[in-house]
Image (cartoon, grey):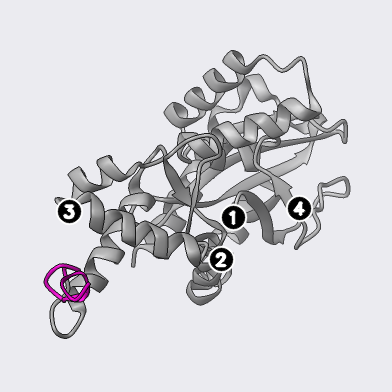
Amino acid sequence: MVADQSPEVLGETPGGTEAADRVADVLLLFARSDSPLGVSKIARSLSLSKAVVHRILQSLVSRSLVQVVPGDSAYILGPAAMGLSARAFSQIDVRSVASPILRHLRDVTRETTTLSVLVGNQRVYLDQFESPEEVKMVIEIGPRYALHSGASSRVILAFLPDSLIDDAIRQLRGQRPDLDEETYRKNLTEIRVRGYATSLNERNTGAASIAAPFFDAAGNVMGSISSSGPAFRYAIDEHDEHAALVIDAAKAITQRLRG
């Protein structure tokens, strides 16, 4: 019993810094992973014993920083980790970073520009700059939206780990039992390749949108921006120039967030 409590067995230095480093390394490994992680994979990736990894995971699970995948022995990030992400947004103040870029995009396109961020497994509008046109799109700041539908959501989803994509598809299938999952996943792949997503009257509101993602310094998707307006002003089949403006604006936000 005494041996089990010794700093050496627990992988700790007298000051406890090595143990803290290992916990941080496990969390960062989850942040970089595109799929759930099991004890063996974490142990191999970080050169730790399975016993040490198991204890770390149990501690993280007890604090909801990671959670077990239902029906599996693997783990994914938990709701508390998502909460830390939301707090990071408020500290970075994405809105102030993006505002001048979105305002310029609005002036160039004369369409409403929006800023969305990823919070947990949902998307939230943080800001918008309204079109000067008489007929325009206006969004509500604050409500949460699912990641499976709409250009601003799908362009975020396309850059998330497979486990979150699977969750979004399950949610969408609950609303659309006839969903063609293969086509849907193919569309997400196309979004990743071209760097933007489009929607045209998707919710029967007469609106159209072109959206692109922005990323943090580690390359994790943080949210998306969009240029949106009435569908009759959007030639979705001939939108290359418009899409390029949105992509460039999103890249400028990413560059500013990276300092």
Q: Which mark is residue 48?
A: 3
Q: CA distance from mark 2 to mark 4?
A: 33 Å
Q: Judge by depth and name the residue closer to the eye, 54 or 147.
A: 54
State the SS at label 1.
loop
State the SS at label 3.
loop
Q: Position of residue 250 (x, y in %)?
A: 49, 50
Label 2 vs 4, first from the N-terminus: 2
Q: CA distance from mark 3 to mark 2?
A: 28 Å
Decide: is 181 above or below 52.
above
Q: Which residue is mark 1?
A: 120
Q: Which residues fall within the magenta stretch?
A: 1-11
Q: Judge by depth and name the residue closer to the eye, 46 or 85.
A: 46
Dot in front, 1 or 4: 1
Tag 2 near tag 1, CB within 8 Å: yes
Q: Which mark is residue 131?
A: 4
Q: Which residue is mark 2?
A: 83
Q: CA distance from mark 4 to mark 3?
A: 55 Å
For the N terminus, give its image quadrant.
bottom left
Q: Amino acid at mark 1?
A: Gly
Q: Position of residue 80 (x, y in %)?
A: 54, 64
Label 1 vs 4, first from the N-terminus: 1
